[in-house]
Every structure is written in structure tokens, then in C-alpha cells.
Image: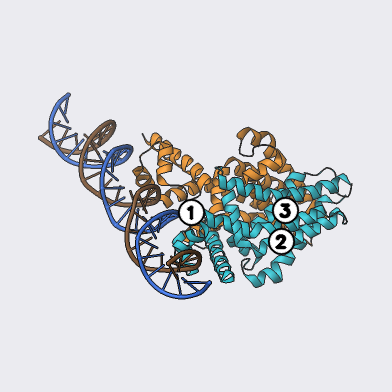
Chain colours: A cyan, B orange, C blue, D brown
Amino acid sequence: MEKEKTDKKDHILDVAERIFAEFGYDGASTRAISGEAGVNMAMLNYYFGSKEGVFLAIFERRIALFQQVLAEIGDDASISPWEKLDKYIESYVEKVVNNNCFHIMLHREISKTKKSELTDKITAIVMKNVTVFQGIIADGVKSGEFKKDTDQELLVATVFGTKNYIINTPHISSVVLGYDVLDGEAQEDKLKPRLKKYLKNLLKAYLQN
Amino acid sequence: MEKEKTDKKDHILDVAERIFAEFGYDGASTRAISGEAGVNMAMLNYYFGSKEGVFLAIFERRIALFQQVLAEIGDDASISPWEKLDKYIESYVEKVVNNNCFHIMLHREISKTKKSELTDKITAIVMKNVTVFQGIIADGVKSGEFKKDTDQELLVATVFGTKNYIINTPHISSVVLGYDVLDGEAQEDKLKPRLKKYLKNLLKAYLQN
DNA sequence: CAAAACTAATCAAACGATTGATTAGTGGAA
DNA sequence: TTCCACTAATCAATCGTTTGATTAGTTTTG
């Protein structure tokens, strides 16, 4: 029973995540989510308290493990900055492409200029990943392995921004790249390896002495 | 009389643009827009037909001149690819930072994975700017001035993505950069020159033989 | 010129539809 | 019986839009 309940909850969150990515938070109605998930509407409130509760539950499900992995890479003292950078890119691209619906949803909400409790929460979550990446760059510069006169802060924008552009504007990037970036098979065969290789090369070109 | 009417319409669009950026298309109510603009609610429908009409009117006001300027840079046969790239970056950063509300609004809508008439329209508009940029890169590679073994398509994602990251996640980028990226003064003094310089350097590092 | 006819701009009020949320109650397992 | 998972029906609030009436300004007409 316990198992099945968790499965059901997970199923609802899966569907909700997709609907939120399709229509946005406000555009996604609780009826659409419950309907698509094949459950009674009242179950959303029963399980998650409210629509916002569903939204936050999606977050809690995704972030915990992900952040831990990235943080461990940043803290690993046994490998060089270049290797850290590679590992970070690998893990990051992998996770973001796999959970593209989640990241689309996340970034649409965070782009609201009006501050709210929700945007503050999301900002705090995203900042953690950014800080780890910044730390890797800063370490590399300090140890002399990366070039000195670079714009470390804007490099953050480039790495995360490039990824966002691919994922968050799928209608555009699919045309530019020549295949459907939301298609699971194309993601595995083409997008992931290509994006990883590209980001590593770009960082090397910009950071190498 | 004619003058004043246009001013009033423009005023409504100014306000609507900001509200859309703050709350998203679905999150922004016609009551909020008309209230903030100090006009009667019915005026939105009287002038623009519908809520979507307001949204599209914002687009038509912004894109025409902008696209023309970018296209002219791309078509200019008298300057080198490197100069074109510089000019494109200059114009692009300038416009996007100045009209940041518009671009936030635009990208939130385009990031909806569900295709609709609206997303198709926006996609077509954005693709024009992308195509011009791609043309500049392709020309430079063909003429041998840019390096050959590069990922031209993902470079597109980097340039537009870096800009988007700064503009569309202002709560994040303000923390990373150390000043409010939505503040007009900071934009002029710090953000614009810094972003222009950075993008040029990054492109140089990646494209130079 | 002045009265009448017409037009565009604006308003408060109300429309039906949809929203997120809640209720009261059902059925089955422990 | 008691508790938990679940449902159909319903709630008040808000949504985008439409309405009919009023104002102010312009044109036409006698």
C-alpha cells in the first residue's frame, strides 16, 4: 500500500511536471493535471495541499540528489580544476537534459521579475549550483591553471545560458540543430555528447593560458 | 488628437509589457494591466481586440526596426566577418538590455513546449535574428577568417543563451555580477560594456585560428 | 450662425466560463 | 468500528469579454 501510494504520487508529479512545462504555472490548471494523470481533482489537494504544493513537491523530488552530486565534485580535493570542470559539465548536462521538463518549468518561474516567496525559494536552489561552478573556476584561476584576465562571472552566464537556450527554447534550438531536442533518442545519441564536447572546448578556448 | 491617442495606446503597451514580464502572460490579468495603466478595462478590448491582441501589439511595436538593423549588418558586404560580429553584438546587447521587459516576456512564452499559434509566431520572429547571426559565422568560416572545426550551431546557443541568462534570470545574475541588472544606471555604466566586451572576447577565443 | 446628426472615446456593470479549493459522503481494509 | 483512500458535487473568487449608456468633439444641415 505504502509503495503504491508513493507510486501514485510520483505519477501525479510526473504528469504535473510536463503540464507545467507545456503551459506554465498559471496556464496549467489543476483540472488538466488531474485529468491527464487520471486521478480525481481533489487528490491534488489531498496529497499536496494546494497547486503550489504540487509545484514545490516537484522541486523537492528533483533537487536533493542533484545538488549533492554537484557539490561533491566541487569539494573533491583529489582532482585538478580541469577535471572538475569536465566532471561538472558531464553531470550537469546529463541531469538537465534528462529532466528537461523540470528545468523549463523552473526557469520560467525564476524569470518573473516580481519577487515572491516562490522566486526566492527557486533562486536559492539555483544559486547553490552556480556557487559550486564559480568555486571551481576561482580555484583554477588561483592555482594558475586557468587564464587570469577572464570574466569569471559572465562565464557562469555562458555555461548555464547555453544549456538553457537549448532546453528552454526547444522550438528554436530544434531548428538550429536539425533534430528534435525534446526527443529522448536524439538526446542520447546526438545532443548530450555534442553539448558536453562543445562546452568543454569552449571553456578550454576561453580559460587556457 | 491623433497624437494623444497614439500616446495613450503606447502607454498601455508600456505598462502591459512590464506586467507581462512580472507575472507571465497567464498570470497578468487584464484588470491588473488596465488598473496600472489608469484606463478602463474595456479600453484594452476596444483598442487591441483582446488580451492576446495586446500581447501581439507589444511585439509589433518592438520587432520591426530591430530586425531591420540586424539584417542590414548581416547584408553589409563592405565589412569583414569580424567587424560584422562586433557590430551585431553591439546592436544586439544594446537593444536587448534596453528592452529587457520585452525579452523576458518573449522568452517565457517561447519556452512553452506545447506548440500554439502564439509560440509559432514568436518562433518565426526570433528565428530571423538567429539566421542573420548564423549567416555571419558561416561566411567567416567559408572565407577562412574563422576557425574551421567549430560547432557553429551551438555557438548560436552560447551567444543568445548568455544574453538570456543575464536578462531572464535577473535575481540570479544580479547576485553573480554584484549589481542590479534591471537598474537602468547599472545597465549603462557596467552591464552593457562588460557584456559586449566579454562576448567579443569569447567569440575571438573560440573562433580565432 | 445655430441646431441637429454623427462619431470616437470612455465608463460602470454584468456576462458566462473557469479557476483553485472544500465539502460531505462512500467503500473497503484493519 | 475505526481509519484511510477516494469521489462527486459544490463553493466563492477571478478570469476575459461584452454590453448599453454617457461624454466630448466634429460635421452636416437648414
Rendered image: mark on residue A26: 1
Q: Is residue A152 above or below residue A186?
A: above
Q: Point out residue A163 in the picture as x, y percentages from the top left corner.
A: 68, 57
Q: Residues at marks 1 and 3, common chain?
A: yes
- Name the residue: 70% across, 59% down: A65
CA separation in Å, label 2 and label 3: 10 Å
Q: Amino acid at mark 2?
A: Val
| Residues flagged by tags 2 and 3 on a common chain | yes
A64 shown above or below A155: below
Mark 2 touches mark 1? (CB < 8 Å):
no
On the image, the x and y values in percent for residue A77 come to: 86, 53
Mark 1 belongs to chain? A
Point 59% across, 62% down: residue:
A101
Q: Which residue is mark 3?
A: A159
Judging depth in this view, the residue of D19 and A125 nearest the camera is: A125
Q: Residue at x 67, y 44 (%)?
A: B173
Give the mark, 2 or 1, whose residue is nearer the N terminus.
1
Q: What residue is rendered at 80% in x and 59% in y? A: A86
* Residue C28 x %, y %: 46, 75
Which residue is tagged 2? A93
Cα separation, mark 1 vs mark 3, equals 29 Å
Q: Secondary structure at mark 1?
A: loop
- Of the numbered discs 2 and 3, the one sitting upstream in the chain is 2
